[in-house]
Image: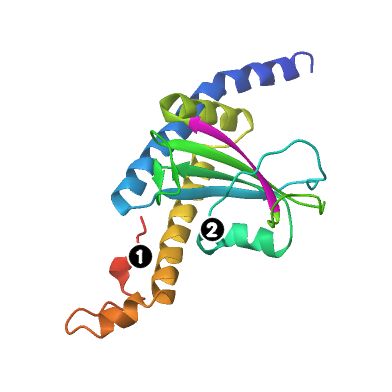
Amino acid sequence: MFGRKERAARREAMELPTRSDAIYSVLENGIKRMQREGVDRCVMHVQPLDGDFEGGFFEKLSYYPEGILTNPEKQMTKDKKSYAAWSLITGDVGGMINYRQPSIEQSERRILKTAFVPWDEKYVNKYVILEGENGLNAFARGAAEDGATGEEIENGINSGIKDYHSKTIELMDKAGVYKWLESRPNRYIAPDDPHLIFEG
């Protein structure tokens, strides 16, 4: 029917601001929850990228230590895949990276294919930082234009926060924190103590 595509395009344009506002609200709530629960970096989404790094102009940009990478990121490194990760950051990430205010960190990590590099790392890293209120708004608009919904972003944040807490418990266990607490009378906290797991 004549005009069907035009009407659909107009409807889509009208819905975009509503979706964008919903995503922004989810990001704001996610930051508040992260601050309450002591989460500094929440990886919302990880996806594989086509193509590896095969040379050209680049800088050495460091990334987070392998020990604190999320399970989806670790799987990408295990599978030797280039990937992108979108993270919600509250500001200071464990003293490693410090942003002035809550931000979205978009990182692109491409597997190195050339031997002619001045360091022994698997990846070349590139960042885009969307900082503060303007950055969160820009991300919300872009995500809405890509067809994302507030519910999808919220699910990503919930999953990222859960992964962060599970990683924290794992690192504490490896560091011997629970064994040390066990040796102190009346101060033992089991690794599966429900007070150590944040959900909701």
Mark 2 or 1, nearer chain start: 2
SS class, disc 1 = loop
| Quadrant of the rendering where the N terminus is positioned | top right
Please state if 65 lies on the left or on the right of 123 as rendered.
left
SS class, disc 2 = loop
**On screen, residue 88 above or below 69:** above
Most extreme residue toward the left is 186
Q: How far is mark 2 from mark 1, CA to CA?
A: 23 Å
Disc 2 and disc 1 in contact, CB within 8 angstroms: no
* Along the line of sight, the residue nearer the viewer: 156 or 189: 189
* Along the line of sight, the residue nearer the viewer: 154 or 113: 113
Please state if 190 lies on the left or on the right of 76 as rendered.
left
Which of discs 2 and 1 lies nearer the camera? The answer is 2
Q: Position of residue 126 (x, y in %)?
A: 64, 40
**On screen, residue 167 above or below 61:** below
Queried whether the magenta region covers residue 127, the answer comes back as: yes
In the rendered image, which residue does mark 1 sit on? 197
At x 57%, y 30%, the residue is 144
At x 58%, y 33%, the residue is 143
Classify residue 177 by image quadrant.
Answer: bottom left
Magenta stretch bounds: 123-130
Q: Position of residue 96 (x, y in %)?
A: 45, 49
Q: Residue flagged by tag 1: what amino acid is it?
A: Ile
Count how many numbered circles sit on residues in the image: 2
Q: Residue flagged by tag 2: what amino acid is it?
A: Pro
Q: Position of residue 66 (x, y in %)?
A: 56, 61
Which color mode does the image show?
rainbow
